[in-house]
């Protein structure tokens, strides 16, 4: 069974207890148990005796007693009677859960958790958290605040369920994973990491064995690592999730992970590996049924082809995919299309390429994506150097300098340092296409520390 035997504390970095985490716990955004998990991690790191005792306790809890073949025979003889007995009970439980869910959804999101905690035993039915989790998953990634509210209520209800419920632990991990992913989408990365760490600890504590639960958590953790520029960790986690989904014939989920992995490879500058991942995903997707996923894979694959200099093939892809671009009339898709088209037209129609670069650059700013606007600016700068329009390059540098002064707080300090070096080089007249290209590649690898809309999450 594809279950991760890595201890919950064997993560990329050790988390510390910070004022921000304590504030998040006081505000109810992170369960208080996270504080215990982090405290135990520090004890394990600092004290050999504590580490040995905690490891022994975890090993004891993982042991499962085997009753022999007779126990299995008795189980199967009883199965038919059990199913008949529970059929009517499940029907009544489902009706009750539907009523409780409708009641909870009628409460304003900010008060839902308080509503649950006012009478937790009334909501402590297995189907209620399952329905909340399913609703939260359907709202991912478009509505992170809604996802967090629903998953938070599901987790609170799961804590009230009897410990012997076989799916209690799995639902707790699913809830924490969805909460953490929502925090990532809201750019609250420290809170996301704390929730993912709590989810990993819960896998062990609750004895969760469902591989789908493990795979989803790996996928979410991979998304966070990707945003933070930890591309090796991101690729490892997403690849592991893809293997699990493929092994369980979860075709769409496996394809989503393959696209996610392709985007990570593209960000890392591994363009051939990115194309392979996108092709692997496309083999399992239907162009009509899975239109958004197909668009994401095709668009990103075309971008990889451009980076490899395969402009003829990339242009053919771009022409073939106009129906996909037309199907999604949102700013994010239109700006990505304009940016890609500008790259394709640099050699054949340089003036039109400049116009499209400018359109994408200002459009991303209007949408609040300073990082994407900066990357487009660097691509435009390389194009202006190639066609010898130095005065326009200097004007672009002046605009970029103003942008960093006014909106630079949304960028990481390392990103700002790289961009200031680029601007100084342009001002000195020493800028080259290679220098701007290397700066853009470095920024892509580092990531923008923000979630990217439109990608599988």
Image (cartoon, grey):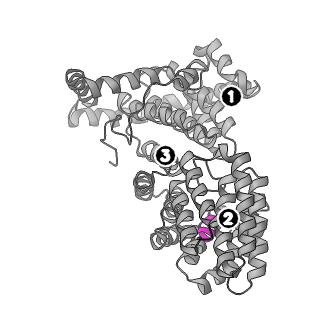
Helix, strand or loop at label 2? It is helix
| Relative side of 154 to 373, left or right | left
Q: Position of residue 196 (x, y in %)?
A: 47, 36
Helix, strand or loop at label 1? It is helix
Kindly report the secondary structure that dominates the magenta region of the rendered protein.
helix
Q: Spatial distance from mark 2 to mark 1, Cα to Cα? A: 46 Å
User: In terms of sequence position, does the residue under pointer 3 or pointer 2 come before the other?
Assistant: 3
Residue indicated by mark 1: 101
The numbered disc on residue 223 is none
Residue indicated by mark 3: 216
Q: Position of residue 455 (x, y in %)?
A: 61, 56
Count of numbered labels shown in the rendering: 3
**Residue 396 versus residue 317: which sits nearer the camera?**
396
At horizontal 41% and vertical 35% (from top left) the residue drawn is: 200
Name the quadrant containing residue 28.
top right
Query: Which of label 2 and label 1 is nearer to you?
Result: 2
The numbered disc on residue 376 is 2
- The boundaries of the magenta stretch are 296-300
User: In terms of sequence position, does the residue under pointer 2 or pointer 1 come before the other?
Assistant: 1
Q: Could you classify mark 3 by the number of other residues whose Cα lies within 10 Å: few (under 14), some (14-19), or many (20 or more)? A: many
Name the quadrant containing residue 423.
bottom right
Q: Position of residue 204 (x, y in %)?
A: 35, 32
Residue 286 shows in this picture: no
Q: Could you classify mark 2 by the number of other residues whose Cα lies within 10 Å: few (under 14), some (14-19), or many (20 or more)? A: many
Q: Spatial distance from mark 3 to mark 2, Cα to Cα? A: 33 Å
């Amino acid at each position: 069974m594809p279950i991760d035997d890595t201890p919950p504390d064997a993560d990329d970095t050790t988390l510390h207890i910070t004022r921000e985490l304590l504030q998040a716990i006081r505000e109810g955004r992170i369960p208080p148990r996270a504080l215990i998990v982090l405290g135990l991690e520090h004890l394990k790191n600092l004290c050999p005796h504590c580490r040995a005792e905690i490891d022994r306790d975890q090993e004891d809890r993982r042991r499962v007693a085997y009753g022999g073949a007779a126990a299995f025979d008795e189980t199967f003889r009883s199965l038919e009677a059990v199913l008949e007995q529970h059929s009517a009970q499940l029907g009544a439980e489902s009706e009750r859960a539907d009523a409780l869910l409708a009641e909870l959804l009628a409460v304003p999101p900010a008060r839902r958790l308080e509503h649950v905690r006012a009478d937790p035993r009334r909501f402590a039915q297995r189907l209620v958290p399952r329905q909340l989790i399913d609703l939260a998953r359907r709202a991912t990634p478009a509505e992170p605040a809604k996802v967090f509210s629903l998953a938070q209520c599901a987790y609170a209800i799961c804590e009230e369920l009897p410990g012997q419920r076989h799916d209690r632990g799995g639902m707790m991990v699913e809830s924490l994973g969805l909460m953490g992913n929502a925090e990532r989408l809201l750019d609250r990365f420290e809170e996301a990491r704390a929730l993912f760490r709590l989810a990993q600890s819960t896998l062990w504590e609750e004895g969760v064995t469902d591989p789908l639960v493990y795979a989803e958590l790996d996928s979410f953790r991979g998304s966070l690592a990707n945003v933070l520029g930890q591309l090796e960790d991101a690729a490892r986690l997403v690849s592991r999730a893809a293997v699990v989904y493929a092994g369980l014939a979860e075709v769409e989920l496996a394809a989503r992970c393959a696209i996610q992995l392709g985007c990570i490879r593209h960000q890392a500058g591994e363009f051939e590996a990115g194309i392979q991942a996108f092709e692997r995903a496309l083999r399992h997707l239907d162009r009509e049924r899975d239109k958004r996923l197909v668009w994401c894979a095709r668009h990103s694959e075309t971008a990889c082809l451009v980076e490899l200099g395969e402009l003829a093939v990339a242009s053919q892809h771009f022409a073939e995919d106009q129906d996909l671009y037309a199907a999604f009339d949102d700013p994010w898709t239109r700006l990505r299309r304009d940016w890609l088209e500008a790259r394709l037209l640099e050699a054949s129609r340089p003036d039109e390429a400049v116009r499209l670069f400018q359109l994408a650059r200002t459009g991303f700013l209007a949408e609040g994506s300073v990082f994407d606007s900066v990357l487009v600016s660097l691509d435009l700068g390389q194009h202006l150097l190639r066609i010898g329009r130095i005065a326009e390059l200097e004007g672009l540098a002046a605009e970029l300098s103003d942008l960093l002064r006014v909106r630079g707080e949304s960028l990481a300090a390392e990103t700002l340092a790289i961009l200031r070096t680029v601007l100084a080089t342009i001002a000195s007249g020493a800028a080259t296409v290679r220098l701007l290209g290397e700066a853009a590649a470095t920024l892509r690898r580092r990531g923008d520390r923000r979630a990217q809309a439109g990608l599988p999450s």
